[in-house]
Image: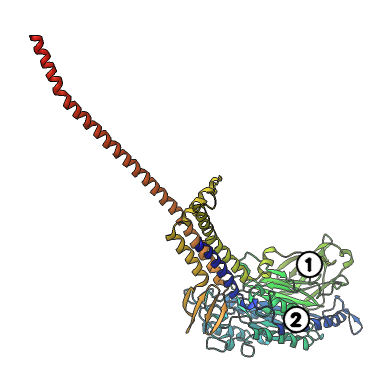
Amino acid sequence: MRFTTAAIALIAFIVIFSIFVANVANLVGIDSKISRRLDAAYSRGQQRLQQQQQQLDGEGGEPFRLDDSPRHLMWFLQISDIHISLYLDPTRIPHLIDFCNRTVDIIRPSVVLASGDLTDAKTSNFLGSQQHEQEWRWYREVLRETNVLNKTTWLDIRGNHDNFNVPALQAKQDLFTNYSVQGKNHPRSYLHQVETKDGDRYSFIAVDACLDPGPKRPFNFVGMLSMNETQHIINLAEQSRAMNTNYTVWFGHYPTSCILTPGLGTSGIRNLIGKYQEGYAYLCGHFHKLGGAVPQMYTMQNEGFLELELGDWMKNRMYRLAAFDHGQFSFVDLQHNQWPVVLVTNPKNALFNIPGKEDPHAQLDSSHIRLLAFSPAKITECQVKVDREEWVDCRRASNELFVVPWEPRKFSYGVHKLSVFIRDEDGRYRVVEHEFTLDGSRKKFSLLARFVLMYDTNKIFQGFFSVALIACLLPLCVFRIWHTLVRNGAVARPRIRTYCCRGWIRKMWILSTVDRLIFPIVGYCLYLTCGPWSFGEVIDGHLGIVFVWGIFVNGSFLPGTLTYFYGFFQLMFCQLPLIVIYANNVVKRAQLEESSSTNKKLQQESTKLKRELDLLKSRLARKKAASAPRRHNWSSSSHTSEEK
């Protein structure tokens, strides 16, 4: 009884302790210095918001209105998870060359964001990881040979694959520094600002959350911002504000749900981005649409900005076209070489309205429907219609912008559908439809997309591991205690009437009483929770120790992330089935022993009866033998008397 109570207490302590160690960065709470800086930034942002609203209402005495003018319009591209590889899919490079040559030439973006995983960094057996210099050479050669750096601004940043097996920044294995566009000047997070001829300023803040040091696969999946890097990112945001930025786009490789942020509290990096009201969206990659399970991984974070995950270039050849039109942010995700390309900027998709940042009356007070259209050939036909009204021809306001007058007051309430038809002179065409609202109502994002982007991935993994650990240990410990209480007479023996439950309860009950099995099972689960899993080269040339709650390598501690998920699989698909097998075998063994005992008892009874029968027979035989002469003498004497 004492042992089982102590065991349960120990299990509870270890689970709590492992979660504490894994979240040590978050458990320290919000750093007071960072908190004061962010609060001050938010207060200054409120003042700037009023000034920005005045700029939206008017500029130089002229109304700042969504009309037929091509002014106050800027667009850019994003590409993510390129994964240039030595061993897989050689078409990735030719398609990337075509993107840099053709797509960039046609769309002419102000900026191209390359949000991480530029190379694949896998070994030939696809199990290990290694930085291949040839992959990085190919990446650099594509950018140089296509002359894309002279056509636009290329902003690249590291992903977890670019950080596989990298012991430190500026190390020999850190090839991003030498071969990327921004690596030499900005090895980690950085700021870039674009100013248009209309005086609008757009800032792009790159967030590098790669682990330092960067371990091999499979321990390099979730990112982390150190305290120093967090301070650096805040400095970038303050610098952007000091440069009188009107609109800010944050981008990085990891979704915010995959970034551990010590000093920023439970909201993490979202708390930082949300304090700067000029930040409209955070653009990322990394999840690859979860293998196609979430094709549109978008959400509105509680802090008031959009988070938009882009599908990968590696398999799906996806890229994103985004635009700011008079302070309204719009985007569309596209597949390479699908033309024409269409992006409606007014009225924008109702799903992506950003309350508190965009002017709520801008669309309602607009005079024209506005859209961007691109194609390799000249666009010869552009028409739009709202709901069931007639198709209306659009007018070309510039090379890329098409407009058509409309009366937004007719659609001021409810949800409406805008349809666009585009055709070029080569016969290619596209029909685009989206819903819009002008009354401030909003639509909801996909439940799975919100779950993936808004919840802490590390806590989800920890939850899975904890559930698996409880499933393996709790039934055995409960039945062990119950059995002890029944044996000591403290409680009555339970009587389970449900047939299916009765069978499993009996099996687990019997297993919990077998010391030779219960102690190793419990001990293994406890060791999996607190003991080291492996010891070896987590990074080439650097020894490390792997626990479920973290990794010690190269003098640094990296909190556990995917290790919890691996532990979950080990417990649920190895340990739990083993417990079930043990329970079945123990019951069968008990039944065999019970049957053997019964047979032995019956055999003993049979032998005893046989002996008694033999004894009885022998007695009868002796009696018969003893009585036989007397009968003979009597008959002889009787015969003699008769003769006489």
**Dot 1 alpha-carbon crowd within 10 angstroms: few under 14, some 14 to 19, many 20 or more:** many
Query: Residue 248 has which mark?
Result: 2
Element under label 1?
A: helix
**Amino acid type of the residue tagged 1 in the rendering:** Ala
Which residue was labeled with disc 1?
A: 350
- Image location (x, y in percent) of residue 60: 90, 85
- Image location (x, y in percent) of residue 502: 53, 48
Q: Are marks 1 and 2 in contact (CB under 8 Å)?
A: no
Residue drawn at point x = 75 percent, y = 81 percent: 248
In this view, the residue in front, 592 or 454, is 592
Q: Earlier in the sequence, mark 1 or mark 2?
A: 2
Element under label 2?
A: strand
Is 98 situated above or below 516? below
**Amino acid type of the residue tagged 2 in the rendering:** Thr
Q: In which image quadrant can residue 18 be found? A: bottom right
- Image location (x, y in percent) of residue 638: 12, 13
Image check: 531 left or right of 177? left
In this view, the residue in front, 306 or 627, is 627
Residue drawn at point x = 13 percent, y = 23 percent: 629
Image check: 121 left or right of 625? right
Q: In which image quadrant can residue 475 be found? A: bottom right
- Image location (x, y in percent) of residue 119: 56, 79
